[in-house]
Amino acid sequence: MAGMVDPKIFESLQTKIDEDAEVRDKIRSILQTLERQGRTAQSVLSRAHSTPAAHLQPVLNSAEEAIAEEVTSIGNLAEATLNSPYYKYNGMWTRDVQNVIFSILFCGWLGGLGGAELVPEAGKLLTIEEVGKVLNVPVNLKDQDAFHITIEEYLQSLITLIEELARLAINSVTLGDYQRPLQISQFVKDLHAGFQILNLKNDSLRRRSDSIKYNVKKIEDIVYDLSLRNLVPKAGA
C-alpha cells in the first residue's frame, strides 16, 4: 500500500527552512557591520564630553561621516528583508537600530546633521519623521508590511539620549561651560513632560521611562549647585 504522506510536503518545508536561514544569515552579516559602525559613531560622539561647545564642529563632521555609513547598512537591511514579513525578523535588529537612532538624535542635538531637508540647530530634538529622512526609510508604517522605524524604537532612543545628556551636563561643568547644564535641564524636563503624556503599553519602554525622573533630578542638582556658587546668571539679572 502506498504511503499516505507525500514526501514533497517535507521537501517544500525544507525549501522554506533554507530560504529562512538564508535571510537570517544575510541579516546577521549586515548587523555585524552595523554594530561595528555603531561603536565607531558613538566613540566619535563621546568626544563631545571632552570638547568645548565652540570647538565641536570637527567632532560633528566625523560623526556625520560615521552615521552616513550606518545609513548605508540600514538601507542594506531594508533591501535584504524586502520580501519578508517585518515582524518575523525585526527582533534581530531592533537594538542596533535603536543605537543608530540615538546617534542621530545626539548628533542632531549637538548641532549636526544639516542637509537639504534639515537645518542644524544645537539643542533641537529631531522628530521621528526627520530621523526617517536621515535614514531614508519610512517610519511608523501601518498600511504595509515593510522595513521601518517604529515609535517604540524612537522612544527607546530618546531615553538613551536623556541618559547621555545627563552625563554631558556633568562634563560640561568640568569644561567650565556653566550655560549648557541649564540648556540640558530645560530640554530634559520638556522630554520628561512629554513622556508623562504617553500611555505606554510596552513593558520595557514603560520601565525605562520611569528612570527619566532620576536623570531630571541629577541634572537639577547640577544646576542647583552651580546657582549656589553663583556660576549661572540669576533670572532677570
Image: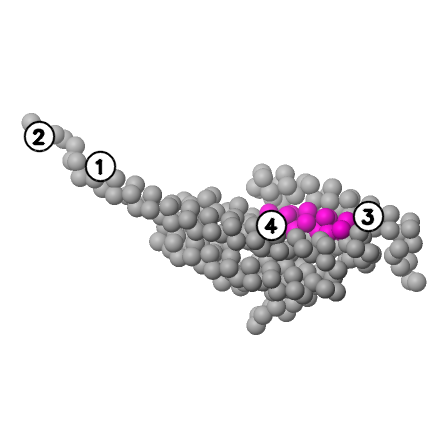
Earlier-in-chain disc, 2 versus 4: 2
What secondary structure predominates along the stretch shown in magenta?
A: helix
Residue at the limit of the structure toward the left, as seen here: 1
Q: Secondary structure at mark 2?
A: loop
Q: What label does residue 157 carry, if any?
A: 4
Dot 2 amino acid type? Ala
Q: Residue at x 63, y 69 (%)?
A: 119
Q: What label does residue 2 carry, if any?
A: 2
Which segment is the magenta one? 154-171
Q: Nearer the viewer, mark 2 or mark 4?
A: 4
For label 3, the residue is: 222
Q: Residue at x 71, y 51 (%)?
A: 165
Q: Secondary structure at mark 4?
A: helix
Q: Secondary structure at mark 3?
A: helix
Q: Residue at x 51, y 57 (%)?
A: 70
For label 1, the residue is: 10
Along the line of sight, the residue nearer the viewer: 237 or 102: 102
Residue 81 position, x and y percent, is 39, 52
Residue 59 position, x and y percent, is 65, 61
Q: What label does residue 124 carry, if any?
A: none
> Is 29 left or right of 196, judged from the image as shown?
left
> Is 118 left or right of 14, judged from the image as shown?
right
Q: Nearer the viewer, mark 1 or mark 3?
A: 3
Residue 129 position, x and y percent, is 56, 61
Q: Secondary structure at mark 1?
A: helix
Disc 2 and disc 3 in contact, CB within 8 angstroms: no
Q: Is residue 130 above or below residue 5?
A: below
Check if residue 73 falls in the magenta segment.
Answer: no
> Is 40 left or right of 25, judged from the image as shown?
right
